[in-house]
Image (spheres, rainbow, N blue to C red):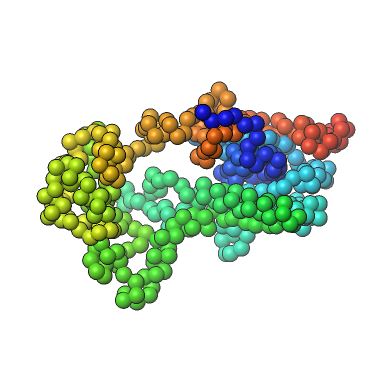
Amino acid sequence: MAESTLRGPLAGVRVIDTSLLGPGATGMHLADLGAEVIKIETPGGGDYVRKMAFPIIDGVSLLHWHINRGKKSVALDLRRPAAVAAYLDLVRQSDVVIEAMRPGALDRRGLSYARMREANPRIVYCHVSGYGLTGPYRDLPSHGYAYDAWAGVARPQFDENGQPYIPAYTTVGIHAGPLFAALGIVAAVLRARETGQGCELEVAQSDAAAAFNWNGIEGNKAHERPADEVTGNDGDGRPGPRRPMGGETMKEAVRYQFYRSRDGFVLFMASEQVFWRNFCEAVDRLDLFERWPGARVAEHARGNVELRHELTTIFATRTTQEWIALSQQANIPIAPVNDAQSIASDPQFLERLPWLPHGAHGTDLMPPPIRWMNESPPPPAKAPIEAGCDTEAVLRDVLGYDAAQIAGVKG
């Protein structure tokens, strides 16, 4: 039984989060780990993420409930000198500033890194943007799909009329960018606490999408070298033939492929010879192994139509959970295949990712995927419904402002 703890691992770290929309997940990751995250919003509505994306739950978008959980909300009109002064006072009392929007937004309000560093030499200032602070696309307006399209992650599909459309897929850049940013921030805070010196860093969501597509990008770069230097897998022959990188390279695979079970789908992954033999023995079809033993590793039996037919027939004889049970019993890599709806009833999901209930969090949310052994950090607080709902409390408790000073900032 995990012991309860009152402090998350980043307790004592204060973060000023000036973000719009999805990149606000940078602050969310830090809040999930126990940091105090103060989201700075404009008066009169704040971040329009509350209405940006479906579904809308009790009048507020799921996107807001998710990425702004655990944060406080302070409304500051940064067009006013008193609000800029209050922002700098917060910088003096904080470890991190996040600018997660178009590049230069804070700088245009007189809140440059140089000015923040004067106020607090230990401050870590992280920019999170679409295409970064440099490059010809720096000022392009964009949303999350753009970074995946640029990075070769999201490629168009075509309808019956030949019109391109965005396929169903899990977006990468808008999620990976905040993760890389949070990692960089934690590293920078560790160094700042050791040396007394902060720093400025930046993460582009487009760069993050490309980083997740490293295999395709680096693989194509490798293929620019001569064919006698860069080949394909030995499992396809020796030397293995080159195959296109980043495309549908698994379409003809047989021993590493999706198959229909009796009640759904499974993913079969017997690309190592030992796993292939285990499977054939477990289903009493050692004849398949004897006929097609394949290479020791990296064997997909590409294009073997006859074997594909045999495996299709075999996998249809058991339910998905029966195949999972056999996988554990006989040491065969077989995985269940879910969609975004069915995974919620998967036993592994239920064990590993118990819901944060809607009563406490505005909607049912998945918990952070980092699990702490023998301790249980407190769950994140509910996302602030109203922009600026914590303004007075933060100005009073963090900065020590009196009523007159608070009134002067609020205008």
Quadrant in which residue 16 is drawn: top right
Instruction: Where is residue 256? Give x, y as percent.
Output: 27, 51
Instruction: Where is residue 373? Give x, y as percent.
Output: 53, 37
Q: Is residue 148 left or right of residue 280?
A: right
Front-lying residue, 80 or 246: 246
Quadrant location of the C terminus?
top right
Instruction: Where is residue 109? Give x, y as percent.
Output: 75, 51
The residue sitting at 44% across, 57% down in the picture is 213
Front-lying residue, 142 or 231: 231
Q: Is residue 189 above or below residue 66?
A: below
The residue sitting at 41% across, 69% down in the picture is 221
Is residue 76 in view from this perspective?
A: yes
Q: Is residue 327 above or below residue 123?
A: above
Instruction: Where is residue 106? Give x, y as percent.
Output: 71, 51
The residue sitting at 51% across, 47% down in the picture is 175
The residue sitting at 29% across, 64% down in the picture is 233
Is residue 253 in view from this perspective?
A: no
Q: How many tags in the picture?
A: 0
